[in-house]
């Protein structure tokens, strides 16, 4: 960090809710980032699955620049064309028929929870409000979202938590059947547990969740905030299966870095949120929507999703080769361009070492390396990371 008295004082004004690396990023282009000292980095995080089309993607920049010159914001008491166009595109490329726009992933989860409760209340009465979630899941930082999240570490100190949430182990059909009953308004899950360790849920479990929801009249909600928008090689992760949800949550990569969230649903479900039941001042902002339209345009070009699959296969092959050379690697898993390397023991210096070497990565609990590279990455960039990982593991394990 290139510090001076002014910047240090300015940084001290920011709430300390993050454990930040000592780096000030000033510029991004494609897979590259630069800090305030001019050092160049290769980004294997995409801002945690956000800038999937690369930093400052030229076509997204062009779309945003054009919209900024026309209209920044207008109340949702009025219509805008970018919002309508984006909603139509999302519906055309998914199961959905209606879209509610908000600003973030947590807000899209909150909207889905409210929709589920309203749906349960309207169809089966006021006692139908329970949401069944998964252990190890992550759904956001708001109060209802951390309650839905199946990791107690995010809940401690914020009790009492809202009533009506229960958790079952992933891929445990028996536990899911026991938990879901006449009080259950919805089953909420990530098709791939992202923050929880990049665990791809079994197809049989997803099918069972669909069947259970159908049997009891509950909604099936998929949180695709991290894995949607092409990350797995399909537009949405659920499209790798024959299971369709009733509701889906999106955010992160939807606008390639501009704040946006979306809650998608079938029409007969979304109709339970009528005028006045939910709202968002900035939801569907025309600038963010213009960026998101361009994101979808690029993802639907011929070969775009296939390229993600090919690059993901290459990354997986290189990581598995690394695992054969280093016994400290316990597992390599993932799908498309969301992948993880789990180590047998903690490697507390790994993230900082790679940062020093010019690579941004995510390391959780000092033993899980999560890789979320931009889709515009090339094989040579992967090779560089593998080379640095190889040498680090050889020297430190």
Image (spheres, helix red, strand yellow):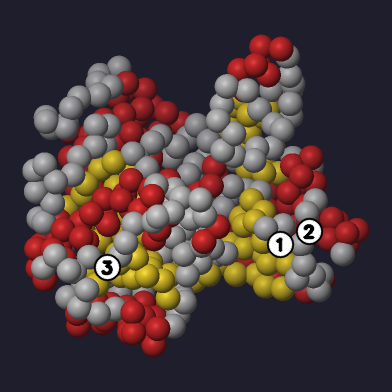
Tell me how far mark 1 sits from mark 2, CA to CA: 6 Å
Determine the residue located farthest toward the front in the rendered image. Answer: 160
Give x and y (percent) for residue 286. Answer: 26, 30
Relative vertical location of residue 20 with respect to residue 49 in this rendering, above or below: above
Q: Is residue 296 visible?
A: no
Residue beneath label 1, please? 367
Query: Is residue 375 found left or right of 276 in the rendered image?
Result: right
- Secondary structure, mark 1, is loop
- Secondary structure, mark 2, is loop
Determine the residue located farthest toward the right in the rendered image. Answer: 395
Give x and y (percent) for residue 371. Answer: 61, 55
Whether pointer 1 and pointer 2 mark residues with C-beta atoms closer than 8 Å, the reply is yes
**Reading the chain from its start, which is encountered first: label 1 or label 3?**
3
Tell me how far mark 1 sits from mark 3, CA to CA: 34 Å
Q: Nearer the viewer, residue 123 or 351?
A: 123
Tell me how far mark 3 sits from mark 2, CA to CA: 40 Å
The residue at the point 24 percent across, 76 percent down is: 213
Residue beneath label 2, please? 347
The residue at the point 39 percent across, 87 percent down is: 174
Residue beneath label 3, please? 130
Whether pointer 1 and pointer 3 mark residues with C-beta atoms closer than 8 Å, the reply is no
Q: Nearer the viewer, residue 125 or 384?
A: 125
The residue at the point 73 percent across, 19 percent down is: 3
């Amino acid at each position: 960090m290139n510090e001076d008295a002014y910047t240090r004082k300015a940084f001290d004004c920011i709430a300390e809710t993050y454990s930040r690396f000592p780096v000030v990023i000033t510029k991004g282009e494609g897979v590259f980032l630069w800090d305030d000292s001019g050092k160049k980095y290769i980004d294997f995080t995409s801002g945690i699955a956000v800038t999937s089309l690369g930093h400052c993607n030229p076509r997204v920049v062009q779309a945003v620049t054009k919209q900024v010159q026309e209209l920044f914001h207008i109340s949702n008491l009025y219509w805008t064309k970018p919002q309508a166009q984006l909603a139509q595109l999302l519906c055309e490329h998914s199961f959905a028929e209606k879209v509610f726009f908000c600003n973030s992933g947590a807000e899209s989860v909150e909207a889905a929870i409210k929709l589920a409760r309203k749906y349960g209340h309207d169809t089966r009465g006021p006692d139908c409000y329970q949401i069944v979630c998964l252990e190890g899941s992550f759904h956001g930082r708001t109060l209802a979202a951390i309650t839905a999240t199946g990791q107690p570490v995010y809940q401690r100190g914020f009790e009492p938590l809202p009533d009506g949430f229960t958790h079952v182990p992933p891929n445990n059909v028996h536990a899911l059947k026991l938990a879901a009953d006449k009080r259950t308004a919805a089953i909420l899950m990530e098709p791939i547990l992202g923050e929880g360790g990049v665990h791809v849920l079994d197809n049989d479990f997803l099918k069972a969740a669909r069947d259970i929801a159908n049997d009891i009249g509950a909604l099936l909600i998929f949180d695709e905030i991290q894995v949607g928008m092409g990350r797995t090689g399909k537009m949405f992760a659920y499209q790798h299966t024959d299971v369709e949800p009733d509701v889906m949550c999106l955010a992160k990569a939807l606008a390639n870095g501009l704040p946006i969230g979306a809650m998608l649903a079938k029409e007969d479900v979304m109709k339970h949120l009528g005028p006045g039941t939910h709202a968002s001042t900035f939801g569907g902002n025309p600038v963010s929507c213009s960026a998101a339209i361009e994101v979808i345009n690029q993802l639907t070009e011929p070969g775009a999703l296939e390229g993600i699959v090919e690059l993901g296969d290459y990354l997986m092959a290189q990581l598995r080769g690394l695992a054969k050379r280093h016994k400290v690697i316990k597992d390599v898993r993932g799908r498309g361009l969301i992948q993880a390397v789990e180590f047998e023991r903690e490697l507390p210096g790994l993230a900082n070492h790679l940062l020093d070497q010019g690579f941004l990565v995510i390391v959780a609990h000092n033993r899980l390396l999560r890789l979320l590279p931009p889709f515009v990455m090339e094989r040579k960039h992967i090779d560089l990371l593998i080379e640095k990982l190889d040498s680090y593991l050889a020297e430190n394990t």
